[in-house]
Image: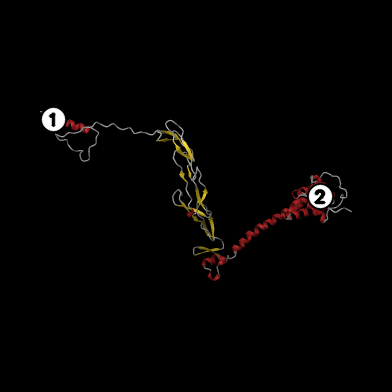
Amino acid sequence: MKRCCSGAAWVTLAALCLAASEPQPQGCQDCAVLPGQWVTVRPPTRLRRHATRPTCPTGMNWIEGARRCCPQCPAGTFLLTPCSSHDNNSICATCPAGTFRAQPNTFHECQACYECDRQAFQSVLSNCSATSNVACGCEPGRFRDCLDERCSDFSCRQCQPCAGRLVQRPCSEAQDTLCGSCKPDFYTEGGECRPCHMSAPETCGKECQRVCGSGRGSGLEYVLLALTGPLFLGALAIYHRRKRLRHGASAGSPLPTARPATPVAGAAAVPCCQGSQLYAVIDAVPVRRWKEFMRVLELREAEIELVELEVAHIRDQQYEMLKRWCQQTSATLDRVFTALEHMELAGCAEALRRSLPAGP
């Protein structure tokens, strides 16, 4: 009877062992509890609660040393001293020269600026600052040959020149030149485009004869046409403009006359169409007010524009305008002085009087 009870106790202990959450060692999960063996029964262990980091508000980061959320340092600075449990202010410092921080942060140092690879023909597009890294690019005449998907690492290769070929797409920093077929008056030989004028008849092959044979010289004709075409159109436009100005000069109305002035003694009714007198008038009137002077003398606007179109030099234009004005019957020195006084150029009028020879 005692032995039977002892067997029941062993069964009870084995059941308690199986009910426990302690895992069994590998290879002993099917082992039976033998009589006479002690089985250690451990109570179920309490699950440990994992410590969770609190979520910080926008613009703040969790600082483990302070065990709290601290404000971020602005871009261009780094965290020198974090906030504490008693002080809510973080101390930030400006990034030293050669370093940067492009975003608000709580890092304890700034990131070192990159350097453009001169051996890969990279050039500096923008220098490094406290808030931005250096921007590297390619020198003119080169394009980027990317070494990764983001093209953060690249070398600069020389753009192909497209010698003798048409350029379908010019070279840029992002891509190489795209060359097309041979230019007019060029033929293909050995994978290159050769000019027709460099080929001798005895060495001209089939492709050379096809392109350069009957059409030799056509490229020069196109060049001559391109050069002479604009000249012909320009001459035609000048002809029509002169014709229109002459028509306006013959049919236009006179401009308002200048206010009368007191006649100058010894100058009234004296003509001013002698060459020396014309140049004396030209020298007396300021160049910047010459057209105004001719309008006051009632030279028609169409005549002024026609002279500017036909004569190249300023002084020759002044002489031609004054000569055309002198063809009028009322062209006298008195009107010249009257015009200068009307333009409030009394000093110029006095200088003109002194430069003219004394009257008879």
* Residue 213 appears in the picture as rendered: no
Circle 2: element type: helix
Q: Secondary structure at mark 1?
A: helix
In the rendered view of the protein, which quadrant contains the C terminus?
A: bottom right
Counting from the top left corner in percent of width and height, residue 146 is at 46, 52
Identified by mark 1, the residue type is Ser
Quadrant position of residue 273: bottom right
* Coordinates of residue 125 in the picture (x, y in percent): 52, 49
Q: Please rate how many residues cluster around mark 1, counting C-alpha atoms within 10 Å: few if below 14, some from 14 to 19, many from 20.
A: few
Query: What's the residue type where badge 2 is placed?
Result: Ala
Identify which residue is drawn at 15% across, 30% down: 8
- Answer with left or right where residue 238 lies relative to residue 117: right
Front position in the image: 274 or 62: 62
Measure the C-alpha gap from mark 1 to mark 2.
149 Å
Q: Residues within 10 Å of mark 2 (few under 14, many from 20)?
A: some
Q: Nearer the viewer, mark 1 or mark 2?
A: 2
Q: Which quadrant, please, contains the N terminus?
A: top left
Instruction: Give residue 6's mark.
Output: 1
Residue 179 visible to an observer of this rendering? yes
| Looking at the image, residue 267 lies above or below residue 81 | below
Q: Earlier in the sequence, mark 1 or mark 2?
A: 1
Residue furthest out toward the bottom? 202
Q: Where's residue 212, x and y in %?
A: 56, 65
| Residue receiving disc 2 | 351
